[in-house]
Image (cartoon, helix red, strand yellow):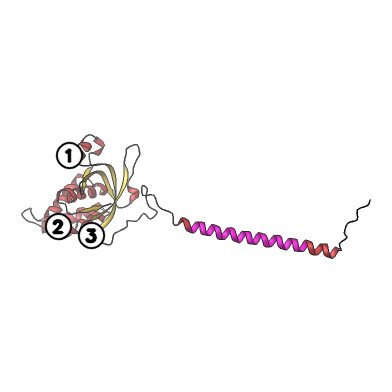
Amino acid sequence: MMRVGKKYSRGTIAMAVINGVFIGVAAVVIIGLLLTATNAKVADSKGPKEIPTSGPSVDEKPIASDGEQSIKLFAKQHGAFSTVEAASTFIAQDPALVKAATIQVVDQYYVWSAVAINPLEIEVSEDEGTYRKEFLADSSACASAGIGGLNEVLKETEVAKIKMLATQNTDEKKGDGKDKSVEFIKNITAITAFTDDLKIIRLHLLSQYTHTDKCVKISF
């Protein structure tokens, strides 16, 4: 028996083809819009990318706090101890820590070997067991006690200006040795005679004024 198929005109076939093309294009556009909207929602839900605290931030400039006598700094840390004797013993046992110092924060004693304004100045190593420690130093209590220049020295980027500060004030500030401002100038003179490294100068000034004079407040 012969099968007889339904016959369509050329116009009907052409219209069917055109309709099929339009439907396919419309489907692609709709799917594309749905995927775009979905990706946008996923991106928003993730939020901003976080910067690892162990490495330098994208912005290399120091970030000052709201207080006029506070500054954000970065230290090279070697260890933390519960007593100053333990920290001193740790330093004495390692010849590489000859210029290191102990920094007291509340009831902990930290062994640091450098303090910088720029985090990139602090080189750390997993092999050494060292890492970069970000902290805030508030010297407002020092200013109240008559040591108003400490904050400026901590922020200074030229050792020559620190030495000039000490030279200019040596003749002007003469007292019986109990004047805190005179004592401050003497400390600067002693430290700058010991080293020209600004990271070491900051370190030992902080050690003096957190552990001995206890007017600098450090927070993490």
Q: Is residue 134 magenta?
A: no
Residue range corresponding to the magenta coloring: 17-44
The image position of residue 161, as x and y in percent, is 23, 55
The image position of residue 156, as x and y in percent, is 26, 55
Nearer the observer, 83 or 77: 83
Q: Main secondary structure of the magenta part?
A: helix
Residue located beneath label 3 in the image: 69
Q: Amino acid at mark 1?
A: Glu
The answer to whether the residue labelled 3 contacts the one labelled 2, judged by CB atoms less than 8 Å apart, is: no
Tell me how far mark 1 sits from mark 3, CA to CA.
30 Å
Residue located beneath label 1 in the image: 85
Q: Residue at x 23, y 60 (%)?
A: 69
The image position of residue 125, as x and y in percent, is 34, 40
Q: Residue at x 19, y 39 (%)?
A: 88
Task: Give the secondary structure at mark 3.
Answer: loop
The answer to whether the residue labelled 1 contacts the one labelled 3, judged by CB atoms less than 8 Å apart, is: no
